[in-house]
Image (tube, rainbow, N blue to C red):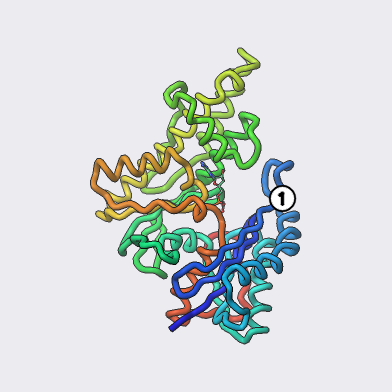
Amino acid sequence: METIILGIESSCDDTSASIFKNNTILSNVIANQNVHKEYGGVVPELASRAHQQNIVPVVHKAIKDAGIKPENIKAVAFTRGPGLMGSLLVGTSFAKGFALAGKIPLIEVDHLHAHVMVHFIKEEGVNKEMPDFPFLCLMVSGGNSQIILMHSYLEMEIIGQTIDDAAGEAFDKCGKVMGLPYPAGPIIDKLAENGNPNAFKFNKPKIKNLDYSFSGLKTSFLYFIRDQLKENPDFISQNINDLAAAIQKTIVEILMEKLIKASRKTGINTIALAGGVSANSALRKALINYADEENKKIFIPKLSYTTDNAAMIAITAYYKYLKKEFAPYDLPPYARNK
Ligand code: KG4
């Protein structure tokens, strides 16, 4: 049976629409919002307005790129949360309207679950291996840092998570202290290529179980820079590459230590990465090295699937469609984790 699904993602500052035929991607259109750059972070009010402007043209383009007709679409899926409420409402309301007009089922998708599901996206003509269940996934983004145990396509268990800031926030906030624009994560990654990761040492948090904490690191980085600037006003510019490499190394070590602990504790040897921070080259390398040394099976997403996109919403929706997990029209979005 051929099932065509339209997925919509509007949880933060990217408006995206994607068309799938079963588990195969036909199109994935993303409109980024540049309005936030000058504010050093996402401005919720501006994000909602930009989603309103983008949503219709983005969906049109996704349908056109996929080479299908709107009437071929069998279900429409949307990100229900977590995210910015004003942003989520745009995608949610659009999806409800589209479902009502086309008399097709509506499917709600959790954004974090969807990030993990990128590992099941099939591309035409590409023979890609997919993880077997159960597997562990380190889901690291600007808003979340979690170790997820995936029992099946639709059953996930969060076995560790941040108790304060997310890993992406740690990158972005430390970058801000160094005067880097938002989002600083990818810039730190680039600067670190020419830096010495051992030039500076930052303390790692001592948190129990499989949970993370990044707020202490951010504060100690801030105080360290403040003290150094008192001695030398050019400290940042003279050491920017080393600072980037050292903070990146610390964040990656914190992430890897708990991930390794999770694998030992659960006995699960299949490990995946997902989310915006999974684009980080040092994190990718650290996981590859660990897999080589300890004989683990790993899954690292394509760069284009690390950031927010609607392809991940559509693939998750496909598996919900197979189980007929449809959403009612009165379902509200949620801003925080379920
Ligand atoms: O998943 P995502 O696109 O958005 C959500 O938070 O939902 O993640 C964005 C986060 C930002 O904090 C950004 O700085 C970080 O991912 N990021 C990176 C890299 N690319 C994106 N952090 C470190 N290294 C990167 N290469």
Quarter of the image with the N terminus is bottom left
> Which residue is the site of mark 1?
43
Q: Residue at x 47, y 78 (%)?
A: 321
Q: Residue at x 56, y 59 (%)?
A: 309
Q: Is residue 209 above or below residue 201?
A: below
Q: Residue at x 32, y 50 (%)?
A: 262
Please state the horizontal and vertical placement of residue 261, each as a whole percent of the image. Answer: 31, 46
Q: Residue at x 49, y 80 (%)?
A: 3
Query: Secondary structure under badge 1?
Result: loop
Residue 187 versus residue 246: which sits nearer the camera? Answer: 187
Count of residue discs: 1
Please state the horizontal and vertical placement of residue 82, each as a whole percent of the image. Answer: 57, 60
Q: Quadrant of residue 186?
A: top right
Camera sees residue 334: no
Residue 284 versus residue 85: which sits nearer the camera? Answer: 284
Give the residue type at disc 1: Val
Q: Is residue 4 above or below residue 314?
A: below
Residue 62 versus residue 294: which sits nearer the camera? Answer: 62
Report whether 320 appears left or right of 7.
left
Report whether 129 appears left or right of 108.
left
Name, please, the residue furthest toward the bottom.
103
Q: Quadrant of residue 228?
A: top right
Please state the horizontal and vertical placement of residue 44, each as a whole percent of the image. Answer: 71, 54
Camera sees residue 223: yes
Please state the horizontal and vertical placement of residue 119, each as a whole percent of the image. Answer: 41, 60
Residue 258 versus residue 104: which sits nearer the camera? Answer: 104
